[in-house]
Image: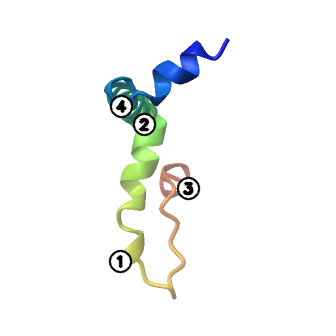
Amino acid sequence: MFEWFKWFTSMENTKPFALVLFFVTFIGIVLYVYSNKQRGDRFESYKNIPFNDDEGEQSTHPEEVNK
């Protein structure tokens, strides 16, 4: 019944499993960020947030900038 647990506790099996897990997570994040054009434009506009003046209260959201 717990054969899978015994398999998982072996270091020879755990390292490749962790590698695959982290690789799949990385690919998922990359696909999430670059899959939607609107999301990409929004993230692109956020890069200038540290340089915005607090007094101006300028919006960096693409939908509000184009108005």
Classify 10 Å Cα crowding around label 2: few (below 14), some (14-19), many (20 and above). Answer: few
Instruction: Left or right? Give the position of 23 relative to 65.
Output: left
Of residue 24 and residue 13, the one placed in the foreground of this image is 13
Q: CA distance from mark 3 to mark 1?
A: 18 Å
Which numbered disc, 3 or 4, marks the residue that appears first in the sequence?
4
Q: Is residue 65 above or below residue 53?
A: above
Q: Position of residue 51 (x, y in %)?
A: 35, 77
* Residue located beneath label 2 in the image: 29
Q: Position of residue 65 (x, y in %)?
A: 49, 57
Q: CA distance from mark 1 to mark 4?
A: 48 Å
Q: Is residue 14 above or below residue 38?
A: above
Instruction: Left or right? Give the position of 57 relative to 10.
Output: right
* Residue located beneath label 1 in the image: 51
SS at mark 3 in the image: helix
Q: CA distance from mark 2 to mark 4?
A: 27 Å
* Residue located beneath label 4 in the image: 11
Q: Position of residue 27 (x, y in %)?
A: 36, 29
Which numbered disc, 2 or 1, marks the residue that appears first in the sequence?
2
Q: Is residue 58 above or below residue 8?
A: below
Question: What's the residue type where badge 4 is placed?
Answer: Met
Which numbered disc, 2 or 3, marks the residue that appears first in the sequence?
2
The label number, if any, that marks residue 1 in the structure image: none
Classify 10 Å Cα crowding around label 3: few (below 14), some (14-19), many (20 and above). Answer: few
The quarter holding residue 41 reads: top left
Question: What's the residue type where badge 1 is placed?
Answer: Phe
Which numbered disc, 3 or 1, marks the residue that appears first in the sequence?
1
